């Protein structure tokens, strides 16, 4: 029991989700109390509270921010494609692309896959198509971060927002390690 409590203390929530979690908890609690108080039959209360609690736990998991160490995967999710592509915005040559799809149950915080200097950051506003659609990579909101490794190799990290995760916030700044 004590190990479970200690493990719970290690769960961190990303600060981007604080307002969402607080306001949604207040809304769920208020609606549950109103249903309990003013509805004669208690069935709507239990149905709403159960569904609301499950939805809240999914959102809580979405904003979880586990401690990561360099060398681990840069994102939760599933690698859906590894292929050689022609990159025409920055490199104008063929590069290897690794695409990781994150579903609703994955943590939506990403880490850089390499360690070094941030060379360039660009944010592009766009749509919010479903992330698995081919046009999403070109039309959806996205952020590009170009990192230069110690041996001079440039690595491009591109995040693409989807229908569920509708914003991208980049904390790194150009010139930072």
Image: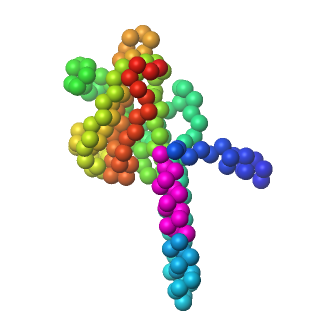
Give the image location of residue 113, x and y in percent: 45, 27
| Residue range of the region highlighted in magenta in the rendering | 16-29
Q: Residue at x 49, y 53 (%)?
A: 19
Give the image location of residue 13, x and y in percent: 56, 46
Please indicate whether residue 43 sits to the left or right of residue 3 in the image: left
Give the image location of residue 44, x and y in percent: 51, 80
Q: Residue at x 38, y 23 (%)?
A: 174
Q: Foreground residue, 167 or 62?
A: 167
Main secondary-structure element of the magenta-colored stretch:
helix
Examine the structure image and report whether residue 53 is included in the region drawn in magenta.
no
Please indicate whether residue 137 sits to the left or right of residue 21 in the image: left
Give the image location of residue 131, x and y in percent: 32, 46
Q: Foreground residue, 2 or 13?
A: 13
Examine the structure image and report whether residue 28 is included in the region drawn in magenta.
yes
Count of numbered circles in the view: 0
Q: Residue at x 53, y 62 (%)?
A: 25
Q: Is residue 52 visible?
A: no
Q: Residue at x 37, y 52 (%)?
A: 164
107 shown above or below 36:
above
4 shown above or below 47:
above
């Amino acid at each position: 029991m004590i190990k479970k409590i200690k493990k719970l203390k290690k769960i961190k929530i990303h600060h981007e989700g604080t307002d969402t979690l607080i306001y949604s908890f207040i809304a769920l609690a208020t609606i549950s109390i109103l249903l309990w108080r003013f509805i004669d039959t208690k069935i709507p209360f239990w149905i709403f509270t159960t569904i609301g609690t499950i939805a809240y736990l999914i959102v809580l998991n979405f904003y979880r921010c586990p401690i990561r160490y360099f060398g681990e995967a840069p994102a939760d999710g599933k690698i859906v494609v590894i292929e050689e592509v022609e990159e025409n915005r920055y490199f104008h040559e063929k590069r290897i692309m690794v695409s990781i799809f994150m579903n609703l149950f994955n943590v939506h915080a990403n880490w850089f896959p390499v360690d070094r200097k941030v060379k360039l950051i660009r944010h592009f506003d766009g749509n919010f198509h479903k992330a698995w659609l081919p046009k999403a990579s070109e039309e959806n909101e996205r952020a590009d971060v170009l990192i230069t490794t110690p041996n001079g190799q440039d690595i491009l990290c591109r995040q693409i927002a989807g229908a569920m995760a509708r914003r991208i916030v980049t904390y790194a700044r150009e010139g930072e390690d």
